[in-house]
Image (cartoon, rainbow, N blue to C red):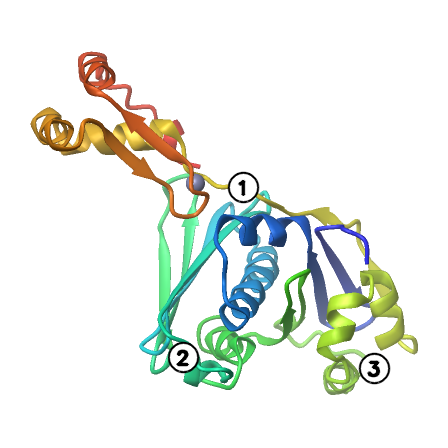
Amino acid sequence: MSDNDTLQRFLFEHTPIRGEVVHLDATWKAIQEKHEYPPLVRNMLGEMMAAAVLLAATLKLNGRLVIQLQGSGPITLMIVECSNAQELRGLAHWQSLPDEGDLMTLAGNGKLMITLDPQDDNERYQSIVELKGERLSDALMNYLQQSEQLDTYLWLAANDQRASGLLLQKLPGDKVTHDGDSWNRIITLTSTVTNDELLEIPELELLHRLYNEEEVRVFEPSPVCFRCSCSKERVINMLRSLGLDEVKSIIADEGEVAVACEFCNQKYAFDSVDVEELFVSSTPSGSSSTRH
Ligand SMILES: [Zn+2]
């Protein structure tokens, strides 16, 4: 199993069906190095990471896609963000876990929120659906059905080594050709895929195995990586918005003001000298370049 961290798009010739397959290796290991997750939480987080790449690619968003699960069960929070450059970060919070359990057991009567956060300060779009289904893929398909109204199928799998996903989507419009039953046939073929196959077989080989009777066109694969969008600049802006008095009182109590990024564990610390400088030099450096 070689590391690749790629998204592979494909389509079925003469049909309105397109697909994507993603494998996360180093990206997924980078996330697991930041926090240690129990296997049940880890696998669901890995599935959400794979899903975020697949959905961000179908939405062709110029900005960030954020998938957030708010649970009332053992898993209380899970967030994954994917940028249009296919840079990912994510984290999960949980309490005491059962030995096993489906989505509803793990997350309870939770909510799934999907936010499209464009880079150019255009309208931010958020939609919320109730968590439903046995697996995260069911809940996401339910979301897609309600909000996108596109026929979309998702298969997701993760273990400690890799997170993988496969998405099929039927494009809107009656672009039906001589092959009107292609959608059902291709869904049936894809439904034979096992978690192990999804995790272990390289993308092109997987497509060949599943669709050897179909006419599949594959595009250039594109890379995916771990990258956190936190920055010193963002933290500075946050401190400035708190105001000098507030920041000084934190320093009086703690000796410094420190902010740690929960996604990547990066710590940003400022002592009293740093803080004086921050506020002296706070001529409105109002460039919006802090937004990544
Ligand atoms: Zn960070």
Query: Disc 3 or 2, which lies upstream in sequence?
Result: 2
Q: Quadrant of residue 179?
A: bottom right
| Image position, residue 201 (x, y; %) | 82, 66
Query: Disc 1 or 2, which lies upstream in sequence?
Result: 2
Q: Quadrant of residue 20?
A: bottom right
Q: Is residue 63 visible?
A: yes
| Residue indicated by mark 2 | 131
Identify the amino acid type marked 1: Arg
| Residue indicated by mark 3 | 178
| Image position, residue 241 (x, y; %) | 18, 32
20 relative to 146, above or below: above
Question: Mark 1–mark 3 contact, CB under 8 Å?
Answer: no
| Residue indicated by mark 1 | 227
Identify the amino acid type marked 3: His
* Real-space Cα separation, disc 3 to disc 2, in angstroms: 38 Å
| Image position, residue 199 (x, y; %) | 73, 68
> Residue drawn 23% across and 18% down?
278
Label for residue 19? none
Instruction: Work out whether residue 135 or residue 97 is closer to the camera in this orientation and state it.
Output: 97
Could you say whether the residue bearing mark 2 is in a helix, strand or loop?
loop
> Residue drawn 55% across and 54% down?
32
